[in-house]
Every structure is written in structure tokens, then in C-alpha cells.
Amino acid sequence: MFRPVLAIAGGVGGAKLALGLSRVLDKSELSIIVNTADDETFHGLHVSPDLDTVMYTLAGLSNIEQGWGLEGETFRFLESLERLGGDVWFRIGDSDLATHIRRKELLQNGYTLTEATKYLCKQLNIDTNIIPMSNDQIKTVAVTEEGELPFQDYFVRRRCEPKISAIRFEGSETATPSPDFELALKNSGSIVLCPSNPLVSIGPVLAIPGVREKVRNFKGPRIAISPIVGGKAIKGPAAKMMTELGEEPSCVSVAQGYIGLIDALLIDHMDDQQSKKITDLGIKPIVTNTIMETSEDKVRLANEVSNLLENWYGD
């Protein structure tokens, strides 16, 4: 039985598939593990960009055109802060600010990040299980030609301009998976790696001690969806980062990074010619339309994933 499904996701791309999966699977059949190595403190508040993107998307509140943030967001707070000489390069909207304030209050009152996320999901009427990868602090650091940069500095403030030579996950060595993540790994029948950046969205999750081994030894089907289509990232800096780290930005490179961790990789029709290279890596290529522009696209791809998992043992 492929259910329950454990989906591992980052921000925009992961949130798209997470939304689709939440619409084709019952709430008891899906757990979404979200990267928290992008988390940062701004203005004294704990900001969880990937968690918030997944939450807002599943709550139907996200800015669909951007893929992140809230629809109809205003920025009066930032305008006032800038007038007072504050640092405003990280754009926190007024409604988004309320999420961060409430999260900080919960954390200060003794909630773990997992418990705070459950609370926020309940307030947003989200019944899907959204789980932070860890309650411990892990920080993605980009090693660049300008020195080491915290991920948000690299991604937002510097707009991914500095060339990178390495990525490290500060604090991962001593971190543990969140208890709900551990439970989902134990009880799930299949694993889905969403089309998120394999380096800085999926990578931090796999860097938590014990997680990579558990995924490697997982008994059920494990599939991933390539976030690289035609040599380009659908969203974000994945292709640029791969190139600078000496990897070809392609679905084949994605497959190479997941050797031993997945059984099948969904790739776009545009990359059909790469199928044999993926097969030669011991991974089954599944050619389909992986681009999700509309809600219908997200549900369609989620249905394909669900059907693939359901029929896995019949292949």
C-alpha cells in the first residue's frame, strides 16, 4: 500500500505539488515535510519562508503570480520602518508580519516549531499535516566569492549574484528530525521528493543525521519530480547553482544527486531524450508534463504521482 504519502518540499515548486497532493489524497494520507534551513530572524521575528509558502498555498491565500507571499499584501509596516532607518531588503508584508509575530509568541511560550506550525495551520483552516523538518536550528550557508552568506542574504539581498563554490548546512550535524517527521518516515508507504531545489531545499532535509539512511533503506516506492526542465529551473536559482558547483543543470544531474534515494524520476516531455541516461543510473524515468502553471496542472500532476504510486507493484 503506497499510502500514507510522505512528501518532502521546499518553497514555491514544492508548494505547488503539495497543493495538488492535498486535493487528491485524504488528509490522513499525506504528510508534507518542509525545509526550514532557510529560516531567519528579521526584526526579532522567526521567519520560515518555505513553511509559510506551503501554508499560504494550501490555505488558498498565496500570491499565485509570485508563488510566494500573500495575495493583496500591503507594505505599510516596511514603509514606516524604512522611514525610521530600518533595514527593509527582506520584504515582509503587513499580513505576513502577523504570522511571524504569532509564531514568535508561540515559540516564546514554549511551543516547538512543529507545535507552532500545527497551531498556525489550524488557524488557517489547513487540515493537511505540514511538518517542519526539524525543531532544531539549521542554516543554509552559501560559500561565495564574497565570503560566506546566510541563505536569505545570498538569495534575496544579493539576488543570487555572487558565484558559489559550496553549500553547507550549519547545525545539521547535531540536529534531529522533528518527532512528527520521524513518525511519518516510519508509517508512510511511499516518499515523494517535490520539484524543489535539490541543493538547498531537499538537501538540508537529507543532511539531518539519519534521514538520508532512512530514505535509502525505505521499503516503499520513492519518486521525485525534476525541478529542472530543458536545462533551466522552473523557479529559483537551482540551475545557476548547479552550474557553479560543476554540475550540468539537467534532469540527469538531478537523478545523479538522488541515486540510491529514489526509484523513479518524473521528467518533462522536453527532456524525453535524457531518459536513457536516467535509466542507466538505475532510476526509472517517467516522461510527462511537469510544468504547473494552473491549479488544474497541480492536481493533474498530483494525480499522476498518486496513480504511479498506486500501480507501482503492478508494474
Image: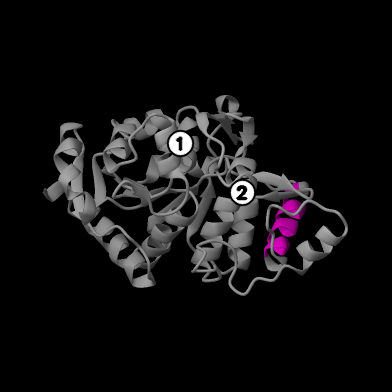
- Amino acid residing under circle 1: Gly
Which residue lies at the image location 50% right of the left edge and 53% below the top edge? 11
Residue ranking furthest to the top: 173
Question: Label 1 crowding class (10 Å Cα cut-off): few <14, some 14-19, many 20+?
Answer: many
Q: How is the image coloured?
A: one colour
Question: Is residue 227 in sight in this rendering?
Answer: no
Mark 2: secondary structure = helix
* The quarter of the displayed image where residue 306 is located: bottom left
Q: Is residue 20 above or below residue 130?
A: below
Q: In the drawing, does residue 86 fall left or right of residue 306? A: right
Q: Residue 310: image x %, image y %?
A: 22, 55
Q: Residue 266: image x %, image y %?
A: 25, 50
* Prevailing secondary structure class for the magenta stretch in the rendered image: helix
Magenta residues, start to end: 96-107
Please state which of residues 129 and 152 is positioned toward the viewer in this rendering.
152
Residue ranking furthest to the left: 315
Please state which of residues 185 and 95 is positioned toward the viewer in this rendering.
95
Q: Give the residue pinned by disc 2.
A: 156
- Amino acid residing under circle 2: Val
Q: Is residue 258 above or below residue 239?
A: above
Q: Give the residue pinned by disc 1.
A: 203
Q: Is residue 131 above or below residue 27?
A: above
Please state which of residues 83 and 51 is positioned toward the viewer in this rendering.
83
Please state which of residues 154 and 173 is positioned toward the viewer in this rendering.
154
Which residue lies at the image location 18% right of the left edge and 36% below the top edge? 277
Say which mark, if any, is on residue 273.
none
Which mark sits nearer the N-terminus, 1 or 2? 2
